[in-house]
Amino acid sequence: MLRLTKWLYGSLHSVTERDVDMPNTVLILEDSKTQALIIAGLFERNGFKADFSHTRHEALHKLSSRRYALVVLDVFIGDENTLDFLDLYRKAAGGAPMAIMTAGRRDMPMAGSQALNKARRSHVDFLLPKPFDFNDVHQICEEAERISRRKGPAKRILVIDDDAYARIMYRSYLEEEGFYVAESTSVEDALVRLEITRVDAILIDLIMPGVGGITGIKVIGATWPDVPIIAMTGYAQNPENLAKAISRGAVSALAKPFTKEVLMSELKKALSDDRIVEI
């Protein structure tokens, strides 16, 4: 009887805990207690509360019983690689945005960059290469809050165009259809922005300063290998640019100006065959 009572109490307690909501709270998985306190301070300065875990089992237990606004996971926890357990964390997190942070390992000089590349390809929401500062955390906090307010499809579209008016117009088209939109002014900017990590499709202008769209398609393709790219250009008098974009890996190429209906049609086709992991 005593065992049955304990089991019933445990079951009821578990159900109650699972309904606990942790609004505006970030769960930080970091095996160094000193670093965990420093990282927590950065999030608290951005208006978030902080909760800690120092092991995988502790983090998974908390995630299974509470709903967090953001989950921040260090890659190397003792001898474990967090990325090997990413599916478990995703399932336990219940759709909460996820950030991956790492400084690498002294015995493996390339481990940090390799881990961040793997995290990006695993479609985590944010990257935090150590050391990071208040401004880096601020970018992610703003984006996490924006994600929590967003309604509609979970598909994320990255628009890369140096023309501010064009970005505003495409954002309007996409958000009217319920898409989540991120913007960059160049290929270089898209690759260094910590809050632009998981995307489901990319719109890229071909003629831009810096790397530009033609070369950028190859660069973007190497960074997000499974993400469909739609190229676009206002230089329709040079149709070879559109053909070159397709040869470089774009799934579609649009001559500017184009209508919302044309964009949505091409985007629907691009996303219909994508291999993005749904979260």
Image (cartoon, rainbow, N blue to C red):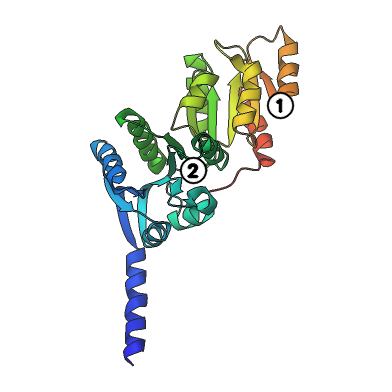
Closer to us: 34 or 171: 34
Callout 2 environment at 10 Å: few (<14), some (14 to 19), or many (20+)? few
Q: Amino acid at mark 2?
A: Gly
Residue 99 shows in the view: yes
Mark 2, residue position: 152
Disc 2 versus disc 1: distance between alpha carbons?
A: 29 Å
Relative image position of residue 120 (x, y in whole percent) = 53, 37
Q: Which residue does the image show at 66% across and 32% down from the upper left?
A: 265
Instruction: Farthest residue to the top: give it.
Output: 237
Q: Which residue does the image show at 37% across and 60% down from the upper left?
A: 58
Closer to us: 197 or 206: 197
Q: Earlier in the sequence, mark 2 or mark 1?
A: 2
Name above or below for residue 39 compared with residue 185.
below
Relative image position of residue 194 (x, y in whole percent) = 44, 31
Relative image position of residue 66 (x, y in whole percent) = 35, 59
Front tag of 2 and 1: 1
Is label 1 in a helix, a strand or a loop? loop
Mark 1, residue position: 249
Q: Amino acid at mark 1?
A: Gly
Q: Quadrant of residue 213?
A: top right
